[in-house]
Image (tube, helix red, strand yellow):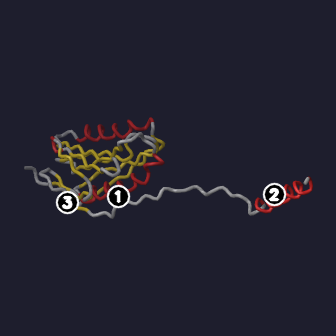
Amino acid sequence: MRNIVISLLSLVFSLFFVVSCTDDVLPKPKAYLSLEYPKKSYKKLDLKRPYTFNILENTTIINDKNNWLKIKYPKLKASIDITYRPVNDNMKELLTEAEKLVFKHAVKAEQIIPKDFVNKEKRVFGSLYEITGNAASHLQFHVTDSTHNFIKGSLYFYAKPNYDSILPAVAYIKEDVLRLMETIEWKKPL
């Protein structure tokens, strides 16, 4: 009986070693988020404003007083807040205020990258600021015709800032901000 038990134990241990002696176990590679965004299709902003520009069709527009807007991205839980101010010999004040709002994020930002924008034909002059890191706003911009109109815009997400997580959404919306800046047209004063 003892020989049978020893034989069975030997057989179990032998099977254990044969089964366990396969290829080395390797750690799984890091997975990357596979985010799919809707294909972009733009339309012209259809509101009575001193300006117009192209917006993404699957956004929601919240009409606000003083020619202000909120362009909401419901699926991304984000919005671009647009403020409008008329220029009345206060261009320096408007530019200073816009830049103060950008650099308010310097405490949490890793880097602030400015890019100038000029379209002499349409009289559109401005800047786009990319803010990297865990700041509250990751894109800010302003555009003006330098004589009558000044627009400032800020991108906000309705979540705690985690730059690595929202980076794909920031890149997706950045295309829309660039499209806005490229297509903006000033209307004649009413």
- Quadrant in which the N terminus appears: bottom right
Q: Residue furthest left?
A: 190
Badge number at residue 135: none
Badge 2 or badge 3: first in the primary sequence: 2
**Where residue 130 appears, x then y in whole percent?**
40, 48
Give the Cα distance between marks 1 and 2: 63 Å
Identified at 76% across, 61% down, the residue is 19
Badge 1 or badge 3: first in the primary sequence: 3
180 with respect to 167 (left or right): left
33 with respect to 151 (left or right): right
Badge 1 or badge 2: first in the primary sequence: 2
Q: Residue furthest right?
A: 3
Question: Of circles 2 and 3, which is in front?
Answer: 2
Which residue is labeled 1 in the image? 175
Give the Cα distance between marks 2 and 3: 75 Å
Classify mark 3: helix, strand or loop. strand
Classify mark 2: helix, strand or loop. helix
> Residue type at mark 1?
Glu
Which residue is labeled 2 in the image? 12
Which residue is labeled 3 in the image? 44
Q: Residues within 10 Å of mark 2 (few under 14, many from 20)?
A: few
Give the Cα distance between marks 1 and 3: 16 Å
